[in-house]
Amino acid sequence: MVMSQYALTSRENEQKRKVALVVGAQGVIGRNLIDYLTTLDDWDVIGVARRGGTSTDRVRYVMVDLLDRDDCHEKLGSLTQVTHIFYAAYQDRPTWAELVPPNLAMLVHVIEAVEPIAADLQHVSLMQGYKVYGAHLGPFKTPARESDPPHMPPEFNVDQQAFLEQRQRGKTWNWSAIRPSVVGGFALGNPMNLASVIAVYAAISKELGLPLRFPGKPGAYDKLLEMTDAGLLARATVWAATDERCANQAFNINNGDLFRWSEMWPKIARFFELEVAPPLPMSLTVVMADKEPLWNAMIEKYGLAPHPYQKVTSWGFGDFVFSWDYDMFADGSKARRFGFHEYVDTEAMFLSIFENFRHRKVIP
């Protein structure tokens, strides 16, 4: 009798375990989400990435080409135990219109492969951003709210959400759309990592004996911005995926404070022991294009980890962010009203990430 009770308890515990399929597992968002999930006792994690990953006792990685429908069905079509899909994959393209087909196709391929065979699927979490509000197009209404009307397409975030909404009708699972600002965290080879842009730009400036100049548009230096810490984002994403109040809802997730580069830039410069000179508009894509030999010499000189120059940063993304000569922030109160109350100090976030880069010998 005792043994059968133990067996029953074991089966109940097994049934309570949740299985996360994290799509885009090697990006700054996916990596931090996996790191957080592995701290929770009742989760098993499957990471999906084009480059795969090193599996552990808590995380199993699957190498998948998400643009290949057949590869998705072959690699993901047996994952019957998945209960939660966390979708954070992204493919970059030169224009806004060109972004739509691949990014919509990747989500469709994942859902079509997993949803029909995952009998206990409970939730699909979609990672979005402020592009939903047209933030990438120019000055937009701030603070942006989840209830704001859509803008003229093309916009893949909107198309992805529309696909999920249609697919979910009549199903037992639900979805959430998570909308962070610029995400701060550690991940190399990521096309949207502002912290690495700043860190490498500052390190090279110091090596050349230069002050730290803000390289963006003149009007961008004093506009209001916000960031989203990757760890905070991970906790909010899991909260929204597991709190029944959040079913079929979108949430802005941000640190909770605002800043201006004119105030933050000198603090960043102090961390790197650099002087600050007046801003000078310049394209990082252009002025940093010839710095690979210098970077390789710095790797040798300071004993840095041998990360290729192309992998440590994305100058195009830096140019994009530093071009925002308009306010860039959203209202995060809906998440608080629904029960998520965490916040992060943005200055502390930046300095912590830079310390992490140094600890990992990415920068001197």
Image: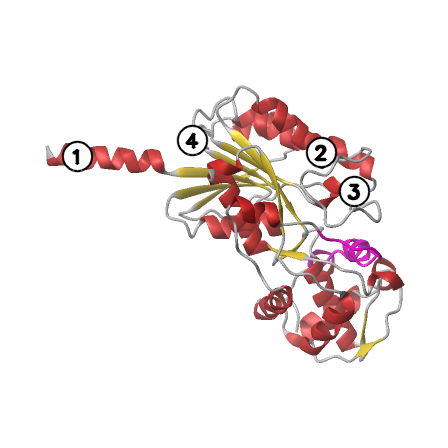
Circle 1: residue type? Gln
Above or below for 357 versus 7: below
Query: In terms of image quadrants, where is residue 363?
Result: bottom right
Circle 1 — which element? helix
Circle nearer the viewer, 1 or 2: 2
Q: In the image, which disc is placed on residue 158? A: 2
Q: Rounded to the nearest whole Å, what is the CA distance between mark 2 and mark 4?
A: 29 Å
Inspect the image, locate mark 3, and give the three-letter code of the amino acid beneath it: Gly
Q: Earlier in the sequence, mark 1 or mark 4?
A: 1
Mark in the foreground, 1 or 4? 1
Q: Nearer the viewer, residue 273 or 330?
A: 330
Marks 4 and 3 sit apart, C-alpha to C-alpha, by 37 Å
Q: Which mark is residue 5?
A: 1
The residue that mark 3 highlights is 134
Does 317 lie within the magenta span? yes
| SS at circle 2 | helix
**Residue at horizontal 54 percent and vertical 48 percent from the top:** 236
At a point 52% along the width and 25% down the height, the residue shown is 115
Which range of residues does the magenta coloring cover?
Answer: 310-329
Q: Which residue is mark 4?
A: 81
Give the secondary structure at mark 4: loop
Q: Position of residue 203 (x, y in %)?
A: 72, 72
Disc 1/disc 3 C-alpha distance (Å): 56 Å
**Residue 59: assigned label:** none
* SS for dot 3: loop
Q: CA distance from mark 3 to mark 2?
A: 11 Å
The reply to whether discs 3 and 2 touch (Cβ–Cβ < 8 Å) is: no
Q: Is residue 331 left or right of residue 60?
A: right
Q: Earlier in the sequence, mark 3 or mark 2?
A: 3
Give the residue type at disc 4. Answer: Gln
